[in-house]
Image (tube, rainbow, N blue to C red):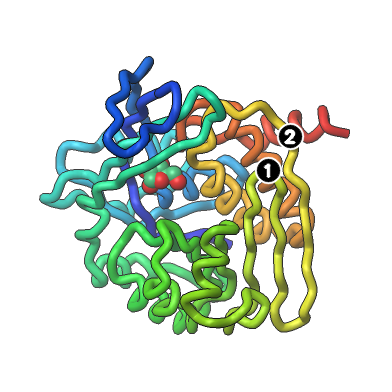
């Protein structure tokens, strides 16, 4: 089947810093680089590198053909990426040398200018059973989710950057919700319900260095995977790598446990590399990495 991804595309500006800046603190970066990013683009690249057929639906500014070309190089189909008269989205990312943790500010730009009509046109080619990935860095999410559900797609929504209202809006349409631990707590508080009682078929909670857990809400069961221990260089995009690999694994018919295991390995490997989309490992890299763990 095809994985569709209605998602952001950013130019990621990385600044390596000794530690994440405190309020009011001025820091000198030790290195600066630009790469392809955006939670959407990262997830598309991850799913494509995992072997899935991926079609990205998104937008960039008129001068940023490089971002489209880069996605295509990684195997993502780009026919539904619009060129709009708004600057491409970008992110300012600080990466701490001490532990690879990050701090991110995004400017949505073109990501917020994607029109519902363009997404509907793209999804005309989608088939029942295809997957649609979404994150919270674009507009018109609820309308897109409604259209996709009506067409028989299975929806996976990553609730990042976290906004409880955005989750509430799409919850009736999605099949699988992906949150990290902090987002899970925020969502439980906002909706006044436990993660296990959310009105959605599946919830995946990523736990950083503790792995991830898949909750099948209807069955009341859980599938857990441990994280693989690595020395972190840059944690940026690890969650996106996990989500893209997970979607590709499910699309390929892997069991939940196996898809989660490969996704966790891909995310661990990503953390050992600086960058976001450009640092996402290929499926061969992931297989070799997994072989070193047994
Ligand atoms: O999840 C990491 C991503 O968040 C970065 O690529 C950045 O662009 C922001 O969207």
Seen in the picture, residue 245 relative to 284 is either above or below; the reply is below
- Which mark, by number, is residue 209? 1
Q: Which secondary structure, mark 2?
A: loop
Left or right of 138 in this view: 167: right
Q: On the rendering, which quadrant does ligand 1 occupy?
A: top left
**How far from the left and from the top, in percent, is residue 4?**
46, 60
Left or right of 12 in this view: 98: right
**How far from the left and from the top, in percent, is residue 288?**
75, 29
Q: Are marks 2 and 1 in contact (CB under 8 Å)?
A: yes
Please report the residue visible at 51 percent of the width from the left and 71 percent of the height from the top. 187
**How far from the left and from the top, in percent, is residue 78?**
36, 48
The CA distance from mark 2 to mark 1 is: 7 Å
Q: Which secondary structure, mark 1?
A: helix
Please report the residue visible at 43 percent of the width from the left and 78 percent of the height from the top. 168
Regarding residue 36, the answer to whether it shows in the image is: yes
Left or right of 280 in this view: 224: right
Furthest-right residue in this view: 294
- Which mark, by number, is residue 200? none
Furthest-top residue in this view: 30
Seen in the picture, residue 227 relative to 96 is either above or below; the reply is below
Q: Quadrant of the C terminus?
A: top right
**How far from the left and from the top, in percent, is residue 275?**
46, 30
Q: Quadrant of the N terminus?
A: bottom right
Q: 174 or 107, which is in the foreground? A: 107
Please report the residue visible at 44 percent of the width from the left and 63 percent of the height from the top. 134
* Crowd class of label 2 (few under 14; some 14 to 19; many from 20; radius 10 Å): few
Tag 1 or tag 2, which sits nearer the N-term?
1
Which residue was labeled with disc 2?
229
Regarding residue 82, the answer to whether it shows in the image is: no
Disc 2 within 8 angstroms of ligand 1 (CB): no
Furthest-front residue in this view: 24
């Amino acid at each position: 089947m095809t994985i569709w991804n209605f998602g952001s595309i950013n130019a990621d500006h990385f600044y390596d810093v000794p530690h994440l800046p405190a309020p009011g603190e001025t820091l000198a970066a030790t290195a600066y680089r630009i790469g392809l990013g955006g939670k959407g683009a990262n997830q598309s690249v991850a799913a494509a590198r995992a072997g899935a057929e991926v079609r990205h639906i998104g937008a960039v500014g008129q001068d940023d053909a490089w971002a489209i070309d880069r996605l295509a190089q990684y195997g993502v189909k780009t026919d539904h990426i619009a060129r709009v008269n708004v600057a491409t989205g970008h992110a300012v990312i600080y990466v701490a040398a001490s532990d690879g943790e990050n701090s991110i500010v995004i400017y949505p730009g073109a990501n917020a200018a994607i029109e519902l009509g363009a997404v509907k046109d793209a999804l005309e080619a989608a088939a029942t059973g295809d997957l649609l990935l979404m994150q919270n860095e674009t507009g018109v999410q609820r309308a897109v989710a409604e259209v996709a559900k009506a067409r028989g797609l299975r929806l996976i929504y990553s609730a990042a950057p976290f906004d409880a209202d955005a989750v509430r809006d799409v919850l009736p349409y999605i099949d699988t919700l992906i949150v990290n631990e902090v987002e899970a707590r925020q969502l439980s508080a906002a909706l006044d319900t436990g993660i296990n009682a959310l009105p959605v078929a599946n919830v995946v909670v990523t736990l950083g260095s503790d792995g991830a857990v898949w909750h099948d809400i209807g069955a009341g069961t859980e599938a857990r995977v441990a994280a693989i221990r690595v020395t972190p260089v840059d944690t940026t995009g690890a969650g996106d790598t996990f989500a893209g690999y997970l979607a590709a694994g499910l699309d390929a018919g892997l069991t939940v446990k196996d898809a989660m295991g490969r996704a966790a390995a891909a995310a661990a490997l990503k953390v050992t590399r600086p960058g976001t989309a450009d640092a996402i490992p290929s499926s061969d890299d992931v297989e070799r990495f997994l072989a070193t763990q047994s």
